[in-house]
Amino acid sequence: MRKPITWAAGMLALSLLATSCGGAGEVADSEGVDLDVSVGVTDDTVTIGTHQPLTGPASAGYLAISQGASAMFDYINDQGGIHGRKIEYLVKDDVYDPTKTVEVTQELVEGEQIFAMLGGLGTPTHSKVIQYLNDKGVPDLFPSSGALMWNDPEQYPLTYGYQVDYTKEAKVLAKYIEENFPDAKVAYYYQNDDVGSDSIAGLDQYLADKVVADEGYESTAPDAVGGQIASFKEAKADIVVCACIPAFAALGILNAVGQGYHPQWVISSIGSDIPTLRGLLKEYADDDELPVDQILDGIITSGYLPQVNMTDDPWTQFFTKIHEEYGEGELTNTRIYGMVQAVMFAKALKAAGENPTRKSLIEAVENMEWQGPGLVPFASSADDHGGHAGVLVQQYQAGEDGGTMKRLQEPMVTDREGGEISPVDYERVGPDEYDFHD
Amino acid sequence: MTSSLRRDDPPTDVVAPKAAPSTRPRPRIRPVLLTHLAAALLALLGVVALTFLVGPIEQLRIAKVGYLMLAIAGLQLLVGASGQISLGHGAFMFIGAYATALTVLHAPMVPLAAIMVLTVVVGCLAGIVVGAATARLHGPYLAGATLALAVGLPALALYFSDILGGSNGLLFKMRGAPPELAGLVTDNQWKAWVIWFTVLVALVVLATLSRGRLGRRLRAIRDDEAAAAMAGIPVGRTKVTAFVISAGCGSLAGACEAYLLGTATPSSFSLALSLSLLAALVLGGLGSLWGAFWGALALVYLELAGKELADLLGLSSSVADNVPLVFFGTLLIVIVMAWPMGIHGALSRLSGVVRRR
């Protein structure tokens, strides 16, 4: 009885051996792919795609990104498109599950034959397809995440970052805190992944000796942040620096209010969209009467894009107009985030010429003088794919019509290492001069 | 503990025709093994042919059906044959996927075959530990213990985030089609073949085991533990053996998933995965390894159908999100009410009716 089983097991081992001779992880460098192609471009359309969490827990905060981009592409198409071609923007749902991301990305690239990927959302998700996209020669523009790995021209020549990276952003915020709150005790509240570790790398450059408490949270375990907040309270931290997504910023704030603890919140841009926070606070507290504006009043945050309540900014005015005409729901900064991605892609595509190829699109991106809509310079040169290069510091002040963002510090740029933080010399142009549609 | 499975459990395995005639004093095992091997070979040829007919996405799904089937088949041996229950098989897939990821990252020179063998070994070791601890537990207590495994183990990746990559998981690249076949065979196709090959070899082992002494012992224990013990069957050891084999299958399935996707993230091995493996087995049919096949097909394609249904009806995202699950659940209830032995039970009854006519 034992014999046939041993036999079968031997067969298993032997036959598996036959299927591979070399090391499974020894991958030959892929030879250069042909970029001089116009996959996805027809006489009257250009098809592009993205993977986004349309359903599932992560969709709450981020659904608006692709909705914003869709609204903008609708507008561009109504203006005649780009060089006579309409843009078909395909949004595939990956539920923020990396396994699904791999599947839908293959679907987009090989099934739908997209010309380029625009704004694939999330670090755990997009990091699983970045190699694939580069191997297939698909331009991977402006992923919706601030991870450092998007800016690696050697390894991922076709990937161009968008969001200011977490370290640079944290550095600017940290220096602001150091200069303006010299005696403060600081607590770090962060997501236990690259969002947290990359942010702390920047924060520690200025705040290392002021930290009295640091606590992480798992993005997979909601509700459980009461303990973190209690330990900040116990350490008597005056400032809580929050490197977290909106859901956990809201949970943290709500828990602090519940515990009668009122620190100065400093929240990085990914978690500080005020309209989103307002909605989440009401939802989590299960109380429509909650004085959310009073709770959120005074939050310090960073930003690099035009904000909803910068009503004087020509881009904000433009986005508000587009949203009224093509969008749905409330205009939030997250929506603007998607709109900016769409506008920038359209500008690059227009610059890629009458008959765009993937190569000419990449060249257009690398040679572009962006001049907006972002508030800071945008890096997309051959050797720096960093995207937005810095942030400004601002403070939310509750008031009529959704309050205002008070600018505390002009936009500053810096690097990831110990380099200087310096003001920017940067000329923005308005939407009228921005050449992004016919 | 008695089992409700007895009533409809088909007496023989379905991969092979009826066993050698009973006039022989000792039915030989070799023809059974040969039949299984021949069937596996045919199935592999079928899969290879199929991959040439469909596009890259479909190839990915075919591969997915393959490794899910393996995980469910391991569960079939445990639940269907031995009457133990495991709500934590996703945890063994997690072990297999991370073992693969770590090997590829830290020792890229190890060949794929060795990785597969290694993951089976690691999975079996985990199975021994868990199985030994849970062999004394019955029914809901065993379910609870394995449930804890499914919930707790993926959290290890968060705890040891330096080595296991935290919630972002591990990212690695594995060889696809050999360069000699470039242009003829795509990476997806090749990976589907390799996965199906692995799965079929493992299934041959499983089918042969469950036809042999171990299978008989397991069924005896499932139907009446006391009677089995009286008959001289080492109950504890046999149950642990079933658990270990089943864990090895789960781990190998996880390795196949990692090989296919080039990633291992904790969120892919959620409790929902463990539960849906079990649900798929019940839907496919507890009594036979074929149940694993139908279950895996249902798992991959019902979700797709559910999504398309939601798209068709133009539902809002908060509703559409849940449609595939509702769809699966409803079907599960309907099928189990009509045919307690699942899709396979329905099909074999149907073929019985046709044959009698």
Image (cartoon, rainbow, N blue to C red):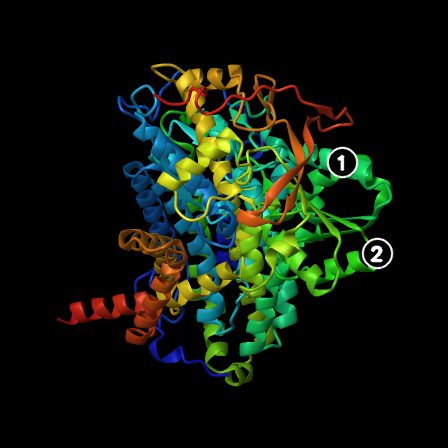
Question: Can residue B93 be seen in the rendering of this structure?
Answer: no
Q: Tell which tag, 1 or 2, sits nearer the viewer.
A: 1
What kind of residue is marked 2?
Ala
Comparing A175 with B211, the one in front is A175
- For image coordinates 50% across by 44% down, the residue present is A332
- Kindly identify which residue carries mark 1: A176
Name the image quarter holding residue B26.
bottom left
- Kindly identify which residue carries mark 2: A235
Residue that sits furthest to the front in the current view: A400
Q: Is residue A339 left or right of residue A186?
A: left
Comparing B98 with A192, the one in front is A192
Q: Chain of mark 2?
A: A
Classed neighbour count for the residue bearing mark 2: other residues with Cα under 10 Å, few (<14), some (14–19), many (≥20): some
Q: Secondary structure at mark 2?
A: loop
Q: Is residue A362 left or right of residue B35?
A: right
What kind of residue is marked 1?
Tyr
